[in-house]
Image: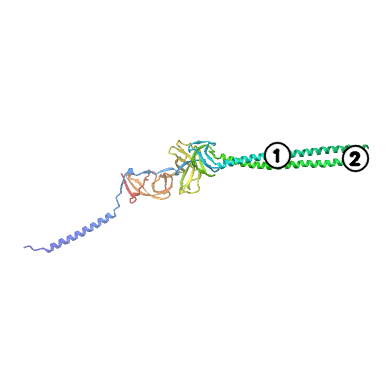
Amino acid sequence: MDIPRQGAARERRRRRVIYGLIGGAALVGVSAGVAHLKPAAPEVERTTVWTDTVRRGPMDIQVRSLGTLVPEDILWIPALTDGRVNHRLLPGVAVRPNTILLELSNPELEQATLDAGWQLKQAVAEFNSLKAQLDSQLLDQRVTAATVQSDYQQARLTGEKDEALVKLGLQSELNQKLSAAKAGAFATRNQIETERVKVLSDSIAAQLAAQQAKIEQLRALYNLKRSQLDSLRVRAGAEGVLQEVLVEVGQRVAAGTILAKVAQPTHLKAQLKIAETQAKDVLLGEKASIDTHNGVIAGHVVRIDPSVINGTRTVDVKLDGPLPAGAVPDLSVDGTIQIEHLESVLHVGRPAFGQPKSIVGLFKLVNGGKEAVRVQVKLGRASVSTVEILNELREGDEIVLSDMSRWDGFDRIRLQ
């Protein structure tokens, strides 16, 4: 019969326990090692990334913004008096200073103009009648004065004759004294009549001046009414193109209402909307270029709006070159303003993310462009499409500029 060997079975159990402990320890060690391994570098298609090479040389600091072309001189035409629109021109037509843009009507003004005209005619007629009457009075006074002067002359001559006869003893002294007294009376009367003519002349001049002032007042009123009546035919006032007509036929408008806009389409400027954070660096006179999408025009900054609207400031750019074909008011344009010119700086294309004067992580190509490693790069001043490099990169380094945010967890990538 078989006899069990208890020692051999115990040995087998002991070996299984030892092997199990060794296997568990090995598994724990492998797991710990795997946990400390760095993740494998992901593979990225080379055609999906945008790269640029760091270079040293001149760099222009620029600001770019969208804007529109607007006329340099805009003539807003208001209504000078109340009226109702009877006729209007349509926008887009070429106009001259005397071109009638709108015709208004105002029956009350027409009646007031007629009344003012009749009042002026009546005042002129009254002036002429008064002048005739006063002239007649002045003539009568002059006749009286002339008669008195003639009597005075006769009395004076008679007195001189009697004085001579007295000296010759041919006439009594009493007659001579009577002649002298008569001549003296006529002399006084002659002086009074002469002064009366002068006083009457001054009075006539004053009366006629008062009536003339009334005529001038009525004439000014009549001319005002005529001018207001003529203003019902609204004229352009300048040569250009009718841009807008802001009222409709049949509409009643009050004095001061803006009726139309006239501008010169050949004299345009660009109005750019610059972000307030960038507008602080823009100065008057700085060079600019305006892209109309059919040509680029050189210009310079002529005005910077001091106010901020919706986070932007308006910058006016005067165009120094000829307008390309298709350049019309309200055309959308792209404007670039040159703020500063740097002679020799290390720079590269502007990355998708990263603000000027900040530190940003960028991938630099290594191993002949097969791999890229992340480096912390300090950026300096930035332009529209380039940025200054202050450290970590050298001339000739190639870096990735496109958005690499999906690889933020990796410091190295492989490029295929």
On screen, residue 186 versus residue 335, left or right, reads: right
Mark on residue 131?
1
What crowding class fits label 1: few (fewer than 14 Cα within 10 Å), some (14-19), or many (20 or more)? some
SS for tag 2?
helix
Q: Position of residue 188 (x, y in %)?
A: 82, 42
| Residues under numbered marks 2 and 1 in contact, where contact means CB atoms less than 8 Å apart | no
- Please state, as top left, top right, bottom left or bottom right, where the C terminus lies in the image: top left
- The mark nearer the N terminus, 2 or 1, is 1
On screen, residue 149 versus residue 246, left or right, reads: right
Q: Position of residue 268 (x, y in %)?
A: 49, 39
In the rendered image, the residue lying farthest to the right is 169
How far is mark 2 from mark 1, CA to CA? 47 Å
Q: Measuring 69% from the left and 39% from the top, which residue is drawn there?
A: 129
Question: How many marks do you count on the picture?
Answer: 2
Q: Measuring 23% from the left and 57% from the top, which residue is drawn there?
A: 27
For badge 2, the amino acid type reads Asn
Q: Position of residue 53 (x, y in %)?
A: 38, 43
Please tell me which residue lies in front, 32 or 192. Answer: 192
Residue 138 visible in this rendered orientation of the protein: yes
